[in-house]
Image: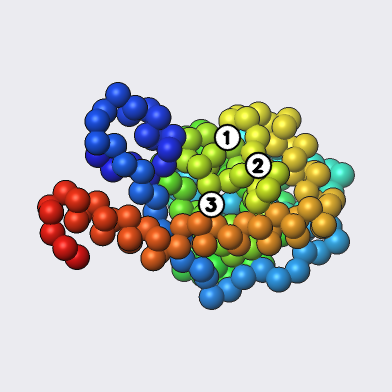
Amino acid sequence: MVVQTQSAADFFKNLRNLLVIPNAVKKPSLQKITALDQAKHIISVGRLCPFKGFDTLIQAFARLYSNYPHLRLTIYGEGNEREHLQSLINSLNLQERVSLPGATQEIHQKLVEADLFVFPSLYEGFPNALAEAMSAGLPVIASNCSGNIDIVRDGMDGRLFPVGDVLKLAALMEELVCDPNTRGHLGEEAKTVAERFHPDLIFHKWDQLIREATGQII
């Protein structure tokens, strides 16, 4: 059995012949270069569904925006939670600050134009959206769920917060919004995700597996 993360391997630890092979992460053609003195745009990406935890993100953002009226939050993606999330936005009077523009074909451009990426999932497999944001050089904050903890090294190339913890997420968001040096450091380190999960390394693992399983020389 092949799984994508050590988190999944730990869940299936009683099985024999278990191998971890992550998804490959390609270095994007666009990468973020500089960090503004104060962040202005927070971004997230994912299907609008309950396990992505976007309600946690919106509630955390609501605790910041009155003190940072320049801040904006954009969540790219589509799904059946759109109505619920929009109702939450409306109830918190965030219509002018939080937007749900749907899916986009220009996500890499949107990433490098943002200042901070937040990924508040309840659980994940191998979160490609998180890896892509990191490879683009964005500082990231992610929940400490399965999948996320297999990619983000807390304090080194991103920050982690307890799943569903609105107060902790708000505190981390405020910390990074106000600290360009930390955002810049985390963003630079985040780019190394494309080296840790380089396609050549991942494809080599598959080649080895197929060779061992079939006894063939590839």
Judged from the image, the secondary structure of the residue bearing numbered disc 2 is loop
Residue located beneath label 3 in the image: 130
User: x, y percentage for residue 28?
Assistant: 52, 70
Residue located beneath label 1 in the image: 144
With respect to residue 9, does 182 lie above or below?
below
Residue located beneath label 2 in the image: 154
Count neighbours of disc 3 (C-alpha within 10 A) and say few if under 14, some if 14 to 19, many if 20 or more: many
User: Looking at the rendering, in which quadrant would you find the N terminus?
Assistant: top left
Q: Label 3 to label 2, Cα distance in Å?
A: 14 Å
Tell whether 169 sits left or right of 44.
Answer: right
Q: Earlier in the sequence, mark 3 or mark 2?
A: 3
Residue at point 37%, 28% (across, down): 11
Residue at point 33%, 60% (across, down): 204
Tell whether 102 sits left or right of 210.
Answer: right
Identity, as a three-letter code, of the amino acid under mark 1: Asn
**From this viewpoint, is residue 83 visible?**
no
With respect to residue 150, does 217 lie above or below?
below
User: x, y percentage for residue 216?
Assistant: 13, 59
User: x, y percentage for residue 131?
Assistant: 52, 55
**Nearer to us: label 3 or label 2:** 2
Is the residue under label 1 in contact with that under label 2 (CB below 8 Å)?
yes
Q: Of 114 and 8, which appears nearest the observer? A: 8
Residue 101 is drawn in which quadrant?
A: bottom right
Q: Label 1 to label 3, Cα distance in Å?
A: 12 Å
With respect to residue 83, does 122 lie above or below?
above
Identity, as a three-letter code, of the amino acid under mark 3: Leu
**Nearer to us: label 2 or label 1:** 2
Identity, as a three-letter code, of the amino acid under mark 2: Asp
Is the residue under label 2 in contact with that under label 3 (CB below 8 Å)?
no
Q: Label 2 to label 1, Cα distance in Å?
A: 9 Å
Q: Earlier in the sequence, mark 2 or mark 1?
A: 1
